């Protein structure tokens, strides 16, 4: 998700990986990723699905605060939270 030319979110972010500068989102308006509208969110998801840096974006998105409701790597905040929980559960259940 690109923030070029748009107001930055108010919380501190970790440094974005260089790969994200090549994201498909860079050529689309920032509000597409933050809209509450279903059509806009689905359009953002389709762009993410074809993005060459989606894996790097997903990794980065999991470092963001849970309050970030934007679409990142094709996932919204609720979906990212579920993925975090799933990963924690798998890690807790894996033998050492």
Image: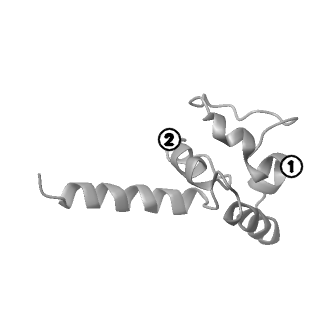
The CA span between labels 2 and 1 is 23 Å
Q: Residue at x 59, y 29 (%)?
A: 15
Residue at image location 78% in from the left, 39% down from the top: 3
**Which residue occupies the foreground of this view, 25 or 63?**
25
* Numbered disc 1: secondary structure: helix
82 w.r.t. 66: above or below: below
Residue marked by disc 1: 27
* Residue carrying label 2: 63
Residue 59 circle label = none
At x 88%, y 35%, the residue is 5
Name above or below for residue 38 compared with residue 26: below
Crowding near pointer 2: few (<14 within 10 Å), some, many (20+)?
Answer: few
The disc, 2 or 1, on the residue closer to the chain's N-terminal end is 1
Q: Position of residue 2 (x, y in %)?
A: 77, 43
Q: Position of residue 83 (x, y in %)?
A: 44, 60
SS for dot 2: loop
Q: How is the image coloured?
A: one colour
Structural crowding at the residue carrying mark 1, measured as other residues with C-alpha within 10 Å and reported as few (<14), some (14–19) or many (≥20): few
Q: Residue furthest left?
A: 96
């Amino acid at each position: 998700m690109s923030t070029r030319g748009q107001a930055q979110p108010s919380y501190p972010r970790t440094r974005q990986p260089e790969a994200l500068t090549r994201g498909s989102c860079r050529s689309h308006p920032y509000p597409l990723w933050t809209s509450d509208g279903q059509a806009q969110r689905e359009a953002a998801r389709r762009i993410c699905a074809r993005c060459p840096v989606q894996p790097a974006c997903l990794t980065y998105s999991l470092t963001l605060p849970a309050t970030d409701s934007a679409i990142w790597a094709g996932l919204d905040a609720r979906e990212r939270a579920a993925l975090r929980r799933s990963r924690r559960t798998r890690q807790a259940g894996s033998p050492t």
